[in-house]
Image (cartoon, rainbow, N blue to C red):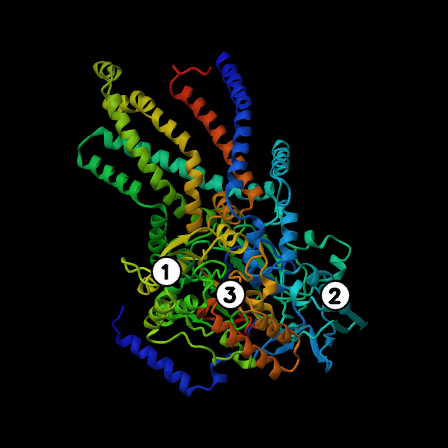
Amino acid sequence: MSVARDRARYIARRVAGAVPTILLIVTLNFLLVHLAPGNAADVLAGEAGSATPEYMAYLRHQFGLDQPLYIQYLDYLKNVVTFDLGYSFREGMPVRDLIFQRLGPTLLLMGTTIVLSIGLGILLGIFGASRPGSLRDNVISVFALVAYATPLFWVGLMLIVLFAIDLRWLPTSGMVNIAAFYTGWQKVGDVARHLVLPAVTLSLFYMALYVRLMRSSMLEQRGMDYVVTARSKGLTERAITFRHVLRNASLPVVTMAGVQIGNLLGGSVVVETVFGWPGIGLLAFRALFSRDLNLLLGIFFVAACLVIVVNIIVDVIYTLLDPRIRLR
Amino acid sequence: MSIFTRRDFLQALAASSGAVLLPEAALAQGTPKQGGTLVMDVLPEPPTLASYLSTSGPIGQVSAKFYDGLCEYNFDLKPQPSLATSWTISPDGKTITFKLRDGVKFHDGSPFTSADVQFSFTEVLKKFHPRGINTFRGLQAIDTPDPMTAVFHLETPAPFMMMALSGYESPIVPKALFAGTDIQNSKYANNPVGTGPFKFVEWQRGQYMRFDRNPNYWRPGQPYLDRIVARFIGDAQTRSAAMQTLEINYGAFGAIPYFDVARLTKIPGIASTTKGYEMQSPVVMLDFNTRVKPFDDVRVRQAISYAIDRKFVIDNVWFGFGKPATGPISSNFAPSGIYTSDVKNYNVPNGADIANKMLDDAGYKRKADGTRFEIIHDITPYGDEWQRYGEYVKQALAKIGIKATLRYEDVPTWLRRVYTDYDFQFTSNWLQNLADPVIGVDRQYSSWSIKKGTVFVNDSGWSSPETDRLMKEAAVEVDPKKRAELYHQFQKLTVEAAPIVWVMELNFVTVYDSKFKNLVVSPLGTYSPFNEVYVQT
């Protein structure tokens, strides 16, 4: 039971250690976003296509832009500490509500993508590595290379053209069929149908990475002494691959996946834009171009928390895959 | 697809003969039936639904469905009854008496009266609406002698005010829900209560807004549609795809990219129109910063005005959706007599030659490398067309020995550069003339519109006492003939001074599912209530 206690203590320590990291991130983010020229009042008035000086002054005052920077910073820090995250004047809603509304679709898309890309990546990596240099290996390698090299938005558009326009199997965009207003299982099915194209698009890219990583890692492990030992014990190749090599070979993939959670949020901006998926990436994109700083900082904050949590999870997964690794 | 196929030919023949043989009334046939859902694409997602606080375009596209105004407008740009059934304007133009429609109810069931009109104009629009602050500046008070009469008292005549009374521009909000509250942060901002044909139901951020039929709408039997759903698809290609599969039925204001319009409208069941933007009148321009050299020199500005090939821009950048602009006022104002084409004409075949000669004469000689001087050309950051437009301008300027470097930044950065820091030389831009020159044109040319930090006003820094006077007089002139004459003078002088290159009057295009009828019935187009829209089965 001491393993479980060690693990709990380790997690608590990591969480405590994350607090200064997050404060540092918050401060850097704050300074960075204020370096960008132009402010929310300019954009809001610009969208209106017309404005009077009175209106501009009113906007600046309402957004607190007429305050000195350090006061804006202190206000913001206070918001973060109390998990308030402030108010988005542009959207007319508290930032926290806005983010939580969008977190669901994003986590759904990210979760599906992680499962799809890691699952397929590991599987194809094993297939390729089991007979290196064979036709199967070459086909998988070329497929991975093409998937990795093709821009996300283009893949997305081509999938739309094929599956939504030509074949009419799947919808082009959105998360639900909005004219239908489904409920219950029908709604689940509807969301799943809408999820297919964005999840496949986003998965292809990451899958390609994991295929290549897994393949080389498998090949490397195969030359190890323990494999020779296992083989001399008379184990079948299948048993060697799945019981011994797989665990060791998947460590780099897990590391990579942990590092890429942040990237996944970034990549999802493109996919969310192309497929009109109502996630947090799209919200961040919008916040940036409208200089909705409260919202932008809120999203950065949530993303930072997400990355830290995922990193802790990845470290714990290490110990499950390889008991030699100790949590300290 | 340059080959004119047999099928195309037959279709063209059928279309043209149909137009010739069938009278107008027969084309708009069919009895409107109740039912159906219209899915419209709104771009981008509106920030709020408070159209009484913000003139942001996407807000108006949906808010006109639930807020009515005192008037609607016909294609002659004449006000028509809406919540007001009639009106009389006193001879001096300072008193306007509106008779209001009896029996109209807000969506919460409360009756609409003159108190709502008084409150909406004096307490909301005049104080907080970005354009209303200007439009209703001279509005001193509104009397309400009885629940169905509202009398507007103006300090000075304001003939343009009658053009600003639509549900899009000046929505009537219920006094009972707003009075005594913080209007800028009202809980009814995103939960609107109006008198319009559709009621707000829900807003799933990032996904859609839903509006259901208002069964108590004041036009009996209308609206015909059961529901309107607004979607927000950020990617242009995806919007085209969604239109092609009819997942969306309606996209206005360039929701469908210009280069896709021809392809989509070839598909049976999809149609397009450029009508419904007569009260927008966007003009594509190039703005000089007349504070900096060499653009403080009118000869340089005129030379560049000559050097731009309008037809090339229209045909190649905007795929034919436009016509050459002649000056600061759009030809959409021709019906009211305000527009004139009798101004200095820069749109001539040998423009580049004239420009070269003018620059030579003005002393901007070509150097050894063939250039006269170098400039940075900023591109207005509102989409791909503008980048292509910038690339054309660069080439056109190269022909007359001006070396231009293109600069493309994001919206906030560009706005800050052009309207606050004045740190630019020459930028592409566009200006919507809106419902009246006082509302849409004066802001670009008057001395009182040179306001640092205010966007979409006079960025060029040019003005003249004479044009200032003409604008001031026209703003209060009640005689339409005299008013038109003042604006003719204004156009002549401004075009001569060339603070702007007026390149083209842009036609926005609406692409729609042709089983929906009556989508465009007024110059307000998408900013209309859609009460007459129905599905033909």
Residue B14: x and y in percent read: 35, 81
Q: Left or right: where does residue A263 sit relative to residue A134?
A: right
Q: Left or right: where does residue A294 sit relative to residue A319?
A: right
For the point 55% across and 62% down, the residue is: B458
> What is the spatial separation of the Cα atoms under label 2 and label 3, in whole angstroms?
33 Å
Q: Secondary structure at mark 2?
A: helix
Q: Residues within 10 Å of mark 3 (few under 14, many from 20)?
A: many
> Image quarter for residue B472?
bottom right
Q: Secondary structure at mark 3?
A: strand
Q: Is residue B329 above or below residue A72?
A: below
> Image quarter for residue B99?
bottom right
> What is the spatial separation of the Cα atoms under label 2 and label 1, in whole angstroms?
48 Å
- On the image, numbered disc 1 is attached to which residue? B388
What amino acid type should be assigned to the residue bearing mark 3?
Leu
For this rendering, which residue is in front, B495 or A27?
B495
Q: Earlier in the sequence, mark 3 or mark 1?
A: 1
- On the image, numbered disc 3 is attached to which residue? B431
For the point 44% across and 49% down, the residue is: A273
Residue A219: x and y in percent read: 24, 25
